[in-house]
Image (cartoon, rainbow, N blue to C red):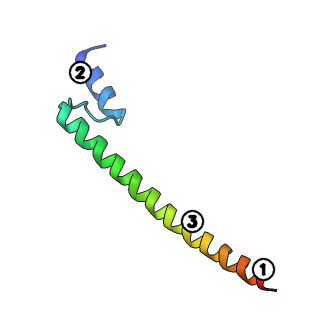
């Protein structure tokens, strides 16, 4: 194994070189991920609330009979 042969093998693996992040960058990434998760949860909650409203309407119709 010569260094010339080892270098192409590393590049062909498709991995990106590791870039060290500062603690600030790590926290900012965590904040962005958490904001994204909260946004998805809010959308899901809005959908579930609409479904609940439909079911409650159906209950009032059924109870009125």
| Residue lying farthest to the top in this orientation | 1
Residue 40: which quarter of the image?
A: bottom left
Nearer the observer: mark 2 or 3; the answer is: 3
Mark 3: few, some, or many residues within 10 Å (few <14, many ≥20)? few
The residue sitting at 60% across, 74% down in the picture is: 53
> Element under label 1?
helix
Mark 2: few, some, or many residues within 10 Å (few <14, many ≥20)? few
Nearer the observer: mark 1 or 3; the answer is: 1
User: Pointer 2: what residue?
Assistant: 4
> Element under label 2?
helix
State which tag comes first along the sequence, 2 or 1.
2
Q: Position of residue 21 (x, y in %)?
A: 20, 32
1 or 42, which is in the foreground?
42
Instruction: Please give the label number shown on residue 63.
Output: 1
State which tag comes first along the sequence, 2 or 3.
2
User: Pointer 3: what residue?
Assistant: 48
Above/below status of 24 relative to 4: below
Above/below status of 19 relative to 35: above
Task: Tell me the CA gap for discs 2 and 3.
Answer: 59 Å
The residue sitting at 29% across, 28% down in the picture is: 8
Q: Position of residue 20 (x, y in %)?
A: 20, 29
């Amino acid at each position: 194994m010569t260094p010339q042969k080892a270098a192409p093998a590393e590049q062909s693996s498709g991995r990106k070189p590791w870039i060290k992040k500062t603690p600030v960058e790590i926290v900012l990434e965590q904040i962005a991920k958490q904001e994204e998760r909260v946004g998805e949860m809010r959308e899901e909650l809005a959908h579930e609330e609409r479904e609940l409203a439909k079911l409650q309407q159906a209950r009032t119709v059924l109870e009125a009979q």
